[in-house]
Image: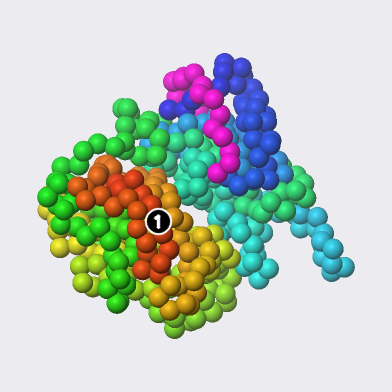
C-alpha cells in the first residue's frame, strides 16, 4: 500500500513529481543521507492509484518520491528521456547524451564515486530509505522491483556532485504497482522487524561470549558487538544482499584481484584486513562496505567468527565491526595503521540497518551482557567507547530466504 499526497494527485500524477522534487531542491548536490523524509501523509487504499509519474531533472542526485512501500510490494519502473553532460575543458571533449541506462563505464570512472558502483554513469537508480545504510540499486529504463522491507522510495541519478551541477535534461519515470505487498502491521514497519526479545539469547549464553577479540600477540582489541543466528550460507547471502563484499585474505590476492577488476572496469573494494582472533582462532570471514576510492582510508568493515554455540538449533556467529576513518600511529611498533571511529556503536547500527534492510532478518534485539564493555583501547592503541549493547540478528531460513532477495 502506498501513501498518497492528496486527491489532486489522482487527477494529475505529475503534480506529485513537482512536489517531491521541490522538497529535495536544496539537496541536489548533497549526499543521499542528508535528504530529510517528507512529512507524513494521509493513507489511501492501494486500489485508488496504480501508477505514478515523475520528472527527474538532471541536476538531482536523489529525490523523495513520497511513496511509502510495504514489505513485498512489487513495482514496475520504466523511464524515458535523456540527459546531457556538457563538453569538458579538453579540446577533444564532446557533449555526452544518454538515456536512463546511463553511459558505459570507462577507465575515467574508476576514480569517481557513484552510488551504484557497477551501474552505468548517469543511470536511473533507486533506494529504499534516505540513510547511509540504504542500498542503492540500478533501475535503468525498465526494472521490476520488490521491496524487501517497508520504506520510503527515492529515485536518483548515478552521478557525482560535479555531474549534477552541469547536467541538462530530464528522465520521465513511471512507477506501476503490480502487487500492494504484504498485509499486517509488520509489513509496514520501515527497515525490518522491530526490537523484541529473542528466544535462546540468555544471560548464560552472553556470559560465554568474549567481549573482545585479540591480535596474534594476545593483545585485546575490537569489541564483539553483533551476534547473528543462521547457517553459513544464510550469513553470506545476507551480507552479499546488503552490499557487503568478502574481503581478500592476503596481499597477493589483493594485487591479483585489483588488476582483474581494473581490466573489467570495476571498483575494487576488497582490500585485505589484518588477522584477529576469537575462540583461539582467526576470523572465518571478513566483509567490507565502502565507497570506491575512499576504500584505502575509510570503510565499514567487520570480522566474523563461528562460535561454539547454537541458538534453538541454529548456528551462532560473533561479529566485531568497526569503521575505519583514517590513519594513526600503531603504538605496538610505531608503524601506520587504520584509525577507527571511537563511537563504535555507529558501526554496530550500520551492520544492523544494512542487513535488516535486505528482508533476510526475521527478528532482532539489542542486549546488554552483565560484563558490558563501555570503554577500551584497540590492540594498536586507539580508544573507543560504547553503550555496551550487542545487536542480535536472526536470519530467515534459507528455504524461504531466496524469495525475498530481488533478482
Using residue 22 as the reference point, say whether residue 391 is left or right of it: left
In percent of the image, x 60 and y 47: which residue is there? 31
Residue underneath mark 1? 384
Q: Eyeballing the image, is 205 above or below 262?
A: above
- Taking the magenta stretch, the answer to whether it contains residue 38 is yes
**SS under mark 1:** strand
Lateral position of residue 82 relative to residue 44, left or right: right
Residue lying farthest right?
Answer: 91
Q: Is residue 51 above or below residue 289?
A: above
Position of 239 relative to 31 (above/below):
below
Task: Determine the residue positioned at 59% across, 70% down.
Answer: 265
Please provide percent x and percent y for residue 213.
28, 65
Q: Reply yes or no: does residue 5 show up in magenta.
A: no
Q: Main secondary structure of the magenta part?
A: loop
Q: Position of residue 29 (x, y in %)?
A: 68, 45
Give the quarter of the image for residue 266: bottom right
Q: Is residue 202 visible?
A: yes
**Residue 169: % across, % down:** 75, 44
Q: Which residues are magenta?
A: 33-50
Q: Quadrant of the N terminus?
A: top left
Residue 252 location, quadrant: bottom left
Most distant residue in the bottom direction: 252
User: What residue sits 64% from the left and 66% below the top?
Assistant: 111
Q: Can residue 236 be seen in this snapshot? A: no
Amino acid at each position: 500500500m502506498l501513501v498518497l499526497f492528496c486527491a489532486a494527485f489522482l487527477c494529475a500524477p505529475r503534480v506529485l513529481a513537482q512536489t517531491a522534487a521541490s522538497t529535495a531542491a536544496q539537496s541536489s548536490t548533497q549526499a543521499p543521507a542528508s535528504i530529510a523524509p517528507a512529512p507524513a501523509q494521509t493513507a489511501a487504499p492501494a486500489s485508488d492509484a496504480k501508477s505514478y509519474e515523475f520528472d527527474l531533472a538532471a541536476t538531482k542526485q536523489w529525490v523523495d518520491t513520497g511513496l511509502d512501500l510495504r514489505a513485498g510490494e512489487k513495482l514496475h519502473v520504466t523511464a524515458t528521456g535523456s540527459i546531457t553532460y556538457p563538453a569538458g575543458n579538453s579540446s577533444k571533449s564532446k557533449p555526452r547524451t544518454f538515456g536512463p541506462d546511463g553511459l558505459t563505464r570507462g577507465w575515467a570512472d574508476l576514480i569517481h564515486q557513484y552510488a551504484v558502483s557497477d551501474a552505468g554513469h548517469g543511470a536511473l537508480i533507486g533506494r529504499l530509505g534516505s540513510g547511509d545504510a540504504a542500498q542503492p540499486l540500478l533501475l535503468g529504463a525498465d526494472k521490476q522491483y520488490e521491496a524487501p522491507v517497508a520504506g520510503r522510495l527515492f529515485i536518483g541519478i548515478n552521478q557525482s556532485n560535479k555531474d549534477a551541477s552541469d547536467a541538462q535534461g530530464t528522465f520521465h519515470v513511471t512507477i506501476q504497482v503490480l502487487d500492494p505487498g504484504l498485509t499486517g502491521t509488520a509489513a509496514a514497519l520501515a527497515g525490518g522487524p522491530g526490537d523484541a526479545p529473542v528466544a535462546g539469547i540468555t544471560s548464560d549464553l552472553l556470559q560465554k561470549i568474549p567481549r573482545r577479540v585479540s591480535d596474534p600477540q594476545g593483545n585485546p582489541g575490537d569489541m564483539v558487538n553483533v551476534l547473528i543466528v543462521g547457517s553459513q550460507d544464510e550469513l553470506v547471502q545476507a551480507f552479499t544482499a546488503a552490499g557487503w563484499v568478502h574481503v581478500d585474505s592476503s596481499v597477493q590476492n589483493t594485487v591479483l584481484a585489483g588488476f582483474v577488476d581494473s581490466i573489467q572496469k570495476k571498483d575494487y573494494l576488497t582490500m585485505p584486513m589484518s588477522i584477529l582472533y576469537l575462540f583461539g582462532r582467526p576470523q572465518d570471514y571478513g566483509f567490507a562496505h565502502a565507497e570506491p576510492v575512499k576504500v584505502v582510508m575509510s570503510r565499514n568493515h567487520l570480522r566474523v567468527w563461528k562460535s561454539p554455540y547454537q541458538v534453538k538449533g541454529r548456528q551462532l556467529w560473533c561479529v566485531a565491526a568497526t569503521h575505519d576513518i583514517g590513519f594513526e600511529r600503531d603504538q605496538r611498533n610505531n608503524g601506520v595503521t587504520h584509525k577507527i571511529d571511537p563511537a563504535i556503536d555507529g558501526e554496530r547500527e550500520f551492520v544492523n540497518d544494512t542487513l535488516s534492510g535486505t528482508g533476510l532478518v526475521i527478528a532482532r534485539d539489542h542486549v546488554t551482557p552483565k560484563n558490558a564493555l563501555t570503554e577500551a583501547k584497540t590492540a594498536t592503541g586507539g580508544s573507543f567507547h560504547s553503550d555496551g549493547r550487542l545487536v542480535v540478528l536472526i536470519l530467515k531460513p534459507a528455504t524461504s530466504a531466496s524469495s525475498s532477495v530481488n533478482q
